[in-house]
Image (spheres, rainbow, N blue to C red):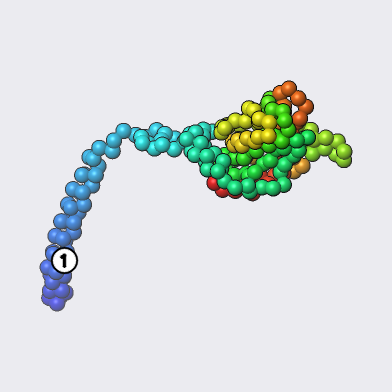
Amino acid sequence: MKALFAILTGYALLSLPDYGYAQALALHRSVINELFATADPGPPIAKGTVPAGDKRDKPGEYNKAQLKACCQKIAKDIQRVYFLNNRNGKMKMQVRGLYTRGPALFFALRLTNRSPMDYVVDSIGFFIVQKGQHTQPPVRLNELSPVYVYDSAALVKRFGRVTSVMVLPRLRLARGQRLLIEVSEKYGRRQLQVLASSFILENARLI
């Protein structure tokens, strides 16, 4: 009995430092918790808002300065595409290159006039067309509006040429569809057309 009493007394004496340490640790943690609990978290941030100073473009918007810089670089670039062209008499249209950056698709167009008459451009249109059956012409489904035009071609003087860059939203064509690029003359019939496939558009060069 005396032996058991001695063992319990020794255990209690040995446990005193541990108990004091546990009390001190609990007090330290409570102080830290109070400091964090009383800290001001600031005003709540609404869901979906953009922090101040964040200059990310909003969806559906294009950075005009960036588009202009890309177009200037493209206008000075060498010819990248050689098979997208069309000729009507002595007028020729070439798609010299297709480029992409972000949500934008860039078309480098060149009009060459080798006739003694000026070519007045009435319009440059972009259309999504469905490939016709057998000998039937393509069916126009939708017209696309450029989001930016650099150095618009309004007049091609005789024996001259003009290069412009047209920017469209990047697109994906369904099976059997093509992108039609059409240039119409204002006072004449020298119409120019080029068809681009989905494969060509999806493999545009990164600018």
Q: Residue at 59%, 44% (x, y): give it.
A: 99
Which one is nearer the viewer's eye here, 132 or 92? Answer: 92
Residue 24 as seen in the image, left or right of residue 138: left
Picture residue at 68% right of the left edge, 37% below the top = 112
Amino acid bearing label 1: Ser
Residue farthest toward the right in the current orientation of the protein: 135
- Residue 151 % position (x, y): 57, 32
Task: Answer above or below: position of 6 versus 73.
Answer: below
Label 1 environment density (alpha carbons within 10 Å; few <14, some 14–19, many ≥20): few
Residue where numbered disc 1 is placed: 15
In which quarter of the view is residue 181 placed?
top right
Q: Quadrant of the N terminus?
A: bottom left
Residue 168 at x, y = what percent? 61, 35
State the residue in front, 64 or 118. Answer: 118
Q: Residue furthest bottom?
A: 3
Q: Is residue 148 visible?
A: yes
Decide which of 5, 199 is in the foreground and name it. 199
Residue 195: x %, y % from top left = 74, 40
Figure check: 65 above or below 11: above
Quadrant in the picture for residue 102:
top right
